Image (cartoon, rainbow, N blue to C red):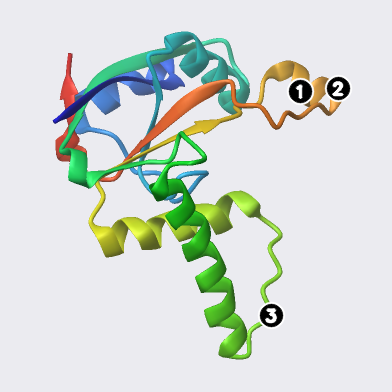
Amino acid sequence: MIEIVGYHGTKSNVRRNIEDNGFIESKGGWLGKGVYFFQDDYEMAKKWAIKKHRTIMVCYIKRIINVAEERFFDITWPLDPRTKYFFQERVNYVMEMEKRGYYIEVDDRVRFEGAILDRICEKKQYDVVRSCTYTYQQIDEKYSLNSILANGVEICVKNNECMKVS
């Protein structure tokens, strides 16, 4: 069993609703559909929430994420076979679409790769995805900056039963 401490950033006035009714799964993102957390980094959760919601009235919610190793898709290391599998599935999907006569034009890389991860997780029955990502900061928007280097580790929980209140 793998145990991860995760922090979810949100607006302060939404926290009570989450605590009472649970998280609402995102429709998509870097790691597909699910509930997103930053591993061991509440500051990054707060920074993300400030940028996303354009307010300083934010907070973080801490959860312990427990997942069986065989249901954990960890793509934090580029040389790991799971990461290589992701990229092979990505190629397979594009080739499959091309064979069916579709032309793939990706205008939203986040949604495209998230959809590939959703397919993998459904096929292999993964409950949690972990990856190194770059989370945009306020300064990035102001100066049109970007980075190819990760500044955090994101967790996407696809099965709510993996989340426990700490």
Question: Where is residue 36 drawn, in percent x and y?
Answer: 39, 33
Amino acid carrying label 1: it is Asp
Q: What element carries label 2?
A: helix
* Local secondary structure at mark 1: helix
Contact between marks 3 and 2 (CB within 8 A): the answer is no
Relative horizontal placement of residue 120, taking residue 86 as reference (left or right): left
Neighbour tally class for label 3: few under 14, some 14-19, many 20 plus, Cα within 10 Å: few
> Mark 3 or 2 closer to N-term?
3
Q: Residue lying at the far right in this picture: please name it.
A: 143
Residue that appears at 86% across and 22% down: 143
Residue 128 placement (x, y as % from top left): 29, 41
Name the residue type under label 3.
Tyr
Give the residue type that dot 2 points to. Answer: Tyr
- Pick the quarter of the image with the N terminus: top left
Up/down of 43 relative to 115, above or below: above
Residue corresponding to mark 2:
143
> In the image, residue 136 lies at what x, y percent?
65, 26
First in sequence: mark 3 vs mark 1: 3
Q: Do the residues labelled 1 and 2 touch (CB within 8 Å)?
A: yes
The 10 Å Cα crowd at callout 2, few under 14, some 14 to 19, many 20 or more, is few
- In the picture of the structure, the residue carrying the numbered disc 3 is 103
Name the element at disc 3: loop
The numbered disc on residue 140 is: 1
